[in-house]
Image (cartoon, coloured by chain):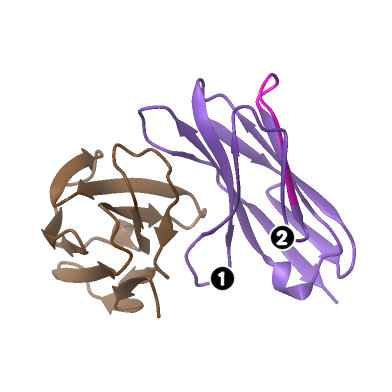
């Protein structure tokens, strides 16, 4: 079983609407949690990073939250744009170990 | 300028051939990685080098052989290519080692198609 599970697997939203992506993990203890955005045909690019003690982190229209007690994180996209169409990957960094990747949330924004 | 560059971007080859993918980073990072992303978009680490030293070597067929001539370069050579090797291969780099996420910078990927 993967240590990082993301839902929904894919999502279609209208331009201008908001959406929330979920990430549940079992990695423990962990150093930090990142959300990456991967555009089609490109490599992943880091959006946000949160340490164990942080609850929320924003990057423009992207807001990530973290609940270390329930081992859940979410990425909220506000006022979606066509350029937000991408895969969003949750990555958890265990201490002294390898990164644990989720399979990604595929988001498609339609006009 | 691209911070992590890999070539070629696309590679189509026949089964049984040997091919190489090259990666270079100009960020001054100590650690470089090769990841494989399969058709289900799952990123899986293959190898990691820190200052030319192999530090992560996942259960990967020995047909795959990484080579790091210096800390700015990490190439991937694949012998006797098989259909199942078709995937997108990403090179990445980071500062620090042991897989701790100090911030990864990924290349744009090499889409390998074995026919």
Q: Is residue B108 part of the magenta span, yes or no?
A: no
Mark 1: secondary structure: loop
Which one is in front, B101 or B81? B101
Which one is in front, B39 or A17? A17
Horizontally, is B65 left or right of A23 in the view?
Answer: left
Identify the hue of chain B. Answer: brown
Q: Position of residue B27 (x, y in %)?
A: 33, 65
User: Is B111 situated above or below B41?
Assistant: below
Which residue lies under the disc numbered 2? Answer: A107
Q: Can the viewer see residue A75 in this picture?
A: yes
Q: Position of residue B68 (x, y in %)?
A: 13, 58
Answer with mark 1 or mark 2, whichever residue precedes in sequence: 1
Q: Residues within 10 Å of mark 2 (few under 14, many from 20)?
A: many
Which residue lies under the disc numbered 1? Answer: A40
Mark 2: secondary structure: strand
Identify the hue of chain A. Answer: purple
Q: Position of residue B70 (x, y in %)?
A: 13, 61
Identify the magenta region: A63-71
């Amino acid at each position: 079983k993967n240590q990082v599970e993301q839902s929904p697997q894919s999502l279609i939203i209208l331009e201008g609407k908001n959406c929330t992506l979920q990430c549940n993990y079992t990695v423990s203890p962990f150093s930090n949690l990142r959300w990456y955005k991967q555009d089609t045909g490109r490599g992943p690019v880091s959006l946000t990073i949160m340490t164990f003690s942080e609850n929320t982190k924003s990057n423009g229209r992207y807001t990530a939250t973290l609940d270390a007690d329930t081992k859940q994180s979410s990425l909220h996209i506000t006022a979606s744009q066509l350029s937000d169409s991408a895969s969003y990957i949750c990555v958890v960094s265990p201490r002294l170990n390898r990164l644990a990747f989720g399979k990604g949330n595929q988001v498609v924004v339609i006009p | 300028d691209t911070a992590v560059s890999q070539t070629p971007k696309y590679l189509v080859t026949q089964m049984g051939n040997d091919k190489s993918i090259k990666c270079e980073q100009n960020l001054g990072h100590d650690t470089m990685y090769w990841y494989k992303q399969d058709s289900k978009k799952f990123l899986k680490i293959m190898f990691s080098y820190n200052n030319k030293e192999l530090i992560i070597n996942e259960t990967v067929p020995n047909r795959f052989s990484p080579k790091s001539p210096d800390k700015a370069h990490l190439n991937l050579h694949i012998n006797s290519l098989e259909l199942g090797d078709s995937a997108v291969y990403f090179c990445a780099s980071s500062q620090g080692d042991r897989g701790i996420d100090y911030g990864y910078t990924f290349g744009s990927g090499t889409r390998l198609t074995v026919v």
